[in-house]
Amino acid sequence: MLGKLLKYEIKSTYREFLGIYCALIASVLLTWTMKLPQLETVGYIASICVFAVMVAAVVIVFISILNAFNKRIFGRQGYLNMTLPASTHQQVCSRLLVSVMWCLITGIVMTISIFLLLQIHGGIFNHMNFGELGDLWTALWENNLVLTIVLILVSILVSIFAIVLSLYCASTVAHLPIFRKFKIVAGILTLVAFSFVESRVVSLLTWMGSGWLNDLGARFSHGVPMAQIPEFVGYLNLIIGIALLITVVFSLAKYFLTTYLLSKHMELE
C-alpha cells in the first residue's frame, strides 16, 4: 500500500515542482544570452536575479509541501485518504518521502544552476585539471575526510527530514479541535516551541561538554599540524555525529507526535 501511496503522491505534486525547476534553469540560461560585452552589466544583474529566484524557489518548495500535506490530510481529500486501507504511518511516510525527494531534486537543480552560472561567467571547467581529482581523493581518504563528507551529506538529508517533519507536526497541532479558531497562530507557536526546545537542549549539551571543547580549542588554536590532521578530523567527525544523532532524535519525536495526533485526536473536515 505504501508504494501505491507514493505513486499517487508523486502524480499529485509533480506539476508544481516541475514548474519551479523549469523557472530555475530558464533563469540561468537567460544569463547566458546576456554574455555579450555590451550586456555584461545586465548579465551580472541577471545573475543576482537568478540567486533571488533560487531563494524564492526554496521558499515556494516548502510552502508547496505544507499546502499539499494540508490539502491531502485536512482538506476535502483528507477524509477519503484517511479511510484508505493504509495506516497513519503509511499515510505520513508516503508524503514525507515524496516531500524529501522533491527537496533533494530542488537541491540538485540548484547545484546544477550554480555550476552553469560559474561556467557561463567564469569558465571554471575550462581551467579545471581533472587529473588532480585522484590526488584529492587520496588526500581525503588518508585524512579520514571521506567519513566527514559522508557524515555531512547524511546530516543534510536528515535535516531535510527534520524540516519537513516540523512543518507536518506544526500543521497537525494547528488543526487540533482546540485550535480551530486560530490555526495559523497555533502553527507558528508550535514551530517557535520546537526551535526553543531544540536550542535549549543543544545549549545544555554544549555546556556539559564545554570543558572538552575548550581543551580541544586550546590544543588547535594555532593551527593543525600535518601529523595531527587525522586526529583533528576524528574529533570533527565526532562532533558532526553527535549533532546528527540529536537531529535524528528530534525528528523521530516530531514524527511520532504527528502520527499520534492524526490517529487519536484529529477531526477531519
Image (tube, rainbow, N blue to C red):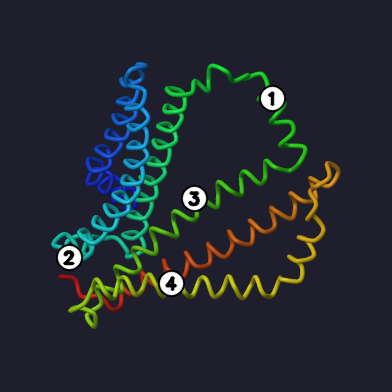
For marks 2 and 1, the one nearer the N-term is: 2
Query: CA separation, marks 2 and 1?
Result: 56 Å
Above or below for 8 versus 173: above
Q: Is residue 76 left or right of residue 142?
A: left
Task: Answer few, some or many: residues within 10 Å of disc 1's Cα (few below 14, many 20 plus, some between 14 and 19).
Answer: few
Amino acid type assigned to the residue bearing label 2 in the image: Tyr
Q: In which quarter of the image is residue 84?
A: bottom left
Given the image, on which type of amino acid does mark 4 rest? Phe
Which numbered dot is residue 153? none
Q: Earlier in the sequence, mark 4 or mark 3?
A: 3
Residue 133 image position (x, y, % from top left): 65, 25
Instruction: Tell me: residue 171, above or below residue 118.
Output: below
Of label 1 and label 3, which has the lower sequence position?
1
Q: In the drawing, does residue 101 fall left or right of residue 135?
A: left
For the residues labelled 4 and 1, the Cα–Cα distance comes to: 44 Å
Helix, strand or loop under label 1: helix
Q: Measure the C-alpha gap from mark 2 to mark 3.
A: 31 Å
> Which three-letter amino acid code belongs to the residue tagged 1?
Gly
Farthest bottom residue in view: 178
Residue 202 horizontal/vertical position (percent): 58, 70
Q: What element carries label 3?
A: helix
- Choose between 18 and 93: the one closer to the eye: 18
Residue located beneath label 1 in the image: 134
Residue beneath the point at 44% across and 24% down:
121
Q: Name the residue under label 4.
A: 194
Q: Identify which amino acid the numbered label 3 is placed on.
A: Leu
Q: Name the residue under label 2.
A: 79
Please report the residue visible at 50 percent of the width from the left and 67 percent of the height from the top: 250
Instruction: State which tag comes first along the sequence, 2 or 4.
Output: 2
